[in-house]
Image (cartoon, grey):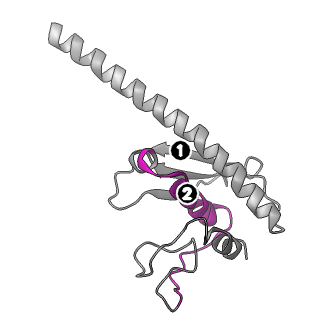
Amino acid sequence: MKRLIIYSVMVIMVSSCVDDVSHEAVNQVQNYFQLFESEAYARGVDLDLEQMNVTAQVEQIEQGNVVGQCKTYSDGSKEIVLDLVYWENATEIEREYLVFHELGHCVLERDHNNERDDNGICISIMQSGTGGCNKRYNELSREVLIDELFE
């Protein structure tokens, strides 16, 4: 009985920690939502993700090799779901790329685009990850790729 109580307390503590981490991650995603709106506005696209009823969730995604998803619900609301393990280990630029990619699906209704330049570099944030182009999203390529996202 004592072991059962200890085990139960440990499960509650671990699940509570995961919820706290997930909640903090969702707060971080909101910063990228604001940045997405700002980048859109700078390119002549006026978006209000809150008004559009777009939310985010950061949780473990069970499907292999998937780090983000766009979900559309019957009431018209949309949610991006980001993998918690990926999120915790990603750099800021990787997080931005992931959020912008998923918002490209959910908000801009963009499909995957696996086109590449002559050097095999992906020309779009909307690349699928399985299309054979090399992803290069960094401070040097960021502006061009965000321009393409909002075209």
Q: Nearer the viewer, mark 2 or mark 1?
A: 2
Do the numbered discs 2 and 1 sit on residues whose CB atoms are within 8 Å?
no
Q: Which residues are magenta?
A: 88-117
The kind of residue on which mark 2 rests is Ile
> Please, is residue 82 above or below residue 13 in the view?
below
The answer to whether residue 123 of the structure is visible from this angle is: yes
Which residue is tagged 2?
93
- Measuring 68% from the left and 67% from the top, which residue is drawn there? 108
Which residue is tagged 1?
57
Q: Which mark is residue 81?
A: none
Determine crowd level at label 2: few under 14, some 14-19, many 20+ residues with C-alpha closer than 10 A. Answer: few
- Measuring 70% from the left and 53% from the top, which residue is drawn there? 35
The kind of residue on which mark 1 rests is Gln
> Please, is residue 85 above or below residue 113 in the view?
above
- Measuring 58% from the left and 56% from the top, which residue is drawn there? 96
Snapshot quadrant of residue 63: bottom left
| In this rendering, position of residue 68 left or right of residue 43 | left
Using the image as rendered, state which of residue 83 and residue 136 is in the foreground.
Answer: 136
| In this rendering, position of residue 39 left or right of residue 87 | right
CA distance for labels 2 and 1: 19 Å
Furthest residue toward front:
140
The answer to whether residue 1 of the structure is visible from this angle is: no
Image quadrant where one finds the N terminus: top left
Determine crowd level at label 1: few under 14, some 14-19, many 20+ residues with C-alpha closer than 10 A. Answer: some
Using the image as rendered, state which of residue 1 and residue 93 is in the foreground.
Answer: 93
Determine whether the residue tagged by mark 2 lies in a helix, strand or loop: helix
Q: Give the x, y percent position of residue 61.
A: 39, 50
Q: Give the x, y percent position of residue 70.
A: 54, 58
Image quadrant where one finds the C terminus: bottom right
Instruction: Determine if the magenta segment contains residue 105.
Output: yes
Instruction: Determine if the magenta segment contains residue 87.
Output: no
Determine whether the residue tagged by mark 1 lies in a helix, strand or loop: strand
